[in-house]
Amino acid sequence: MMSQSERKARYIMTGGFLGAGKTTAVVRLARNLTDRGLRVGLISNDQSRGLVDTAAMRSHGFAVEEIAGGCFCCRFNSLLDATRSLTRATRPDVFIAEPVGSCTDLIATVSYPLRRIYGDEFEIAPLSVLVDPNRAARILGLSEGRSFSEKVIYVYRKQLEEADIIVINKCDLLDAESLDRLRRALRDAFPRAELLACSARTGDGLEDWFGKLLEPGRHKMHALALDYARYADGEALLGWLNATAAISAQQEFDANAWLLDLGRRLGAALRPQVREIAHLKMTLDVRDIAGSLCVVSLVGGDAEPEMRETLADRVDAGTLVINLRAEGDPELMRRVTTQVLNECIDNVPGLSATIEHLERFRPAKPTPTHRLTVPV
């Protein structure tokens, strides 16, 4: 029998466009695997540092490594370093990696190289790509509303084209007829992928998906035919803003309500200024107390922000993290964000904020470390 030290770690990559609900799904998957007695290591990824996703994963007690400064394909060596660091710390049986939401071509640039170069260390699971059903319905022409330009949609569709498994997340948001219509449209457009539906928020349908990720044996991978110039153009239309601020108050206040109000005001202010909001995520982190994190998420310019996690008590200090992704000018996003934040600070007597980190940019042209297009 193979000893624990000789077993290959399973590498599970969960992709999907910005706002698809990947982090909630990853946390659910990690908890499920932990309940099965498996050790889990999580790897988050972004074009920059200071991620809401990383804070959310760590708040659930999981070992997390964050890869910043580019997607997995361009930071392949950093991805390996992250697995080594997690192995030294906790010796995971399973690595769960969540790539940047604007990234595609993951099989040729990550899965194939891992299998070919490091196949004695990793068993590669099928590539899952999650979709937000409302956004997918608009992009596939099933409903009307705000959406992205064609160059951004090119990236979105390429993500789905390379998926082994397309997971309709947030299926609790749809009635049966709408879900069936979306299933048919996805099946017609991307017939190669297996199609599943679930809700990471409620837990419905997750067991079927998790089972697919753990099935033994090699699965067939499918490298993507991709126009890298067009891919780069689509990514470059997206503005990125990350901000971190220290929040303090003269007396305790309801930070849950305050953060939700900040999300509403920021969404309303951005709506006429950008083509579409890909995802706005914010956390207020209060260390060393139970229920120490509140999380607000907004997906799409037509949507309202949702409170995903809440603080248990009123607080007088914390660390605010804002991650904003939109098809729009990053400098405009900075101006709007700082203006709205200042307004919300002024609305609470005695509240103040010190911005510790703020950056805005457009993603650089992707330059993969490896790109293998022949099945291994």
Image (cartoon, rainbow, N blue to C red):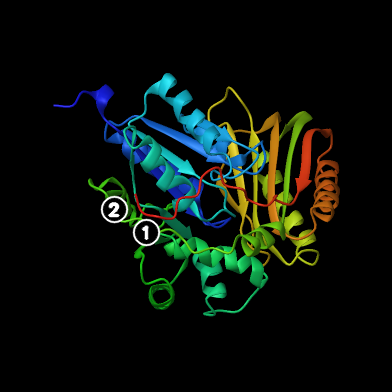
- Circles 2, 1 touching at the beta carbon (< 8 Å): yes
Q: Which residue is labeled 2 in the image?
A: 219
Q: Does residue 312 appear in the picture of this structure?
A: no
Image quadrant where residue 151 sits: bottom right
N-term-proximal mark, 2 vs 1: 1
Of 290 and 270, which appears nearest the observer? 270
How far across and down, in percent of the image, does residue 46 sit?
61, 43
How far across and down, in percent of the image, does residue 373 sit?
44, 55
Residue that appears at 75% across and 54% down: 266
Residue 351 drawn above or below residue 306: above
Residue that appears at 46% across and 58% down: 130
Of 76 and 207, which appears nearest the observer? 76
Q: Amino acid at mark 2?
A: His
User: Which secondary structure lies at badge 1?
Assistant: loop
10 Å crowding of disc 2: few (<14), some (14-19), many (20+): few
How far across and down, in percent of the image, does residue 264 sit?
71, 56
Of 203 and 314, which appears nearest the observer? 203
Horizontal relation, residue 253 to residue 225: left or right: right
Q: Gap between marks 2 and 1, in whole Å?
A: 9 Å
User: Which secondary structure lies at badge 2?
Assistant: loop
Q: Which residue is labeled 1 in the image?
A: 164
Image quadrant where residue 175 sits: bottom left
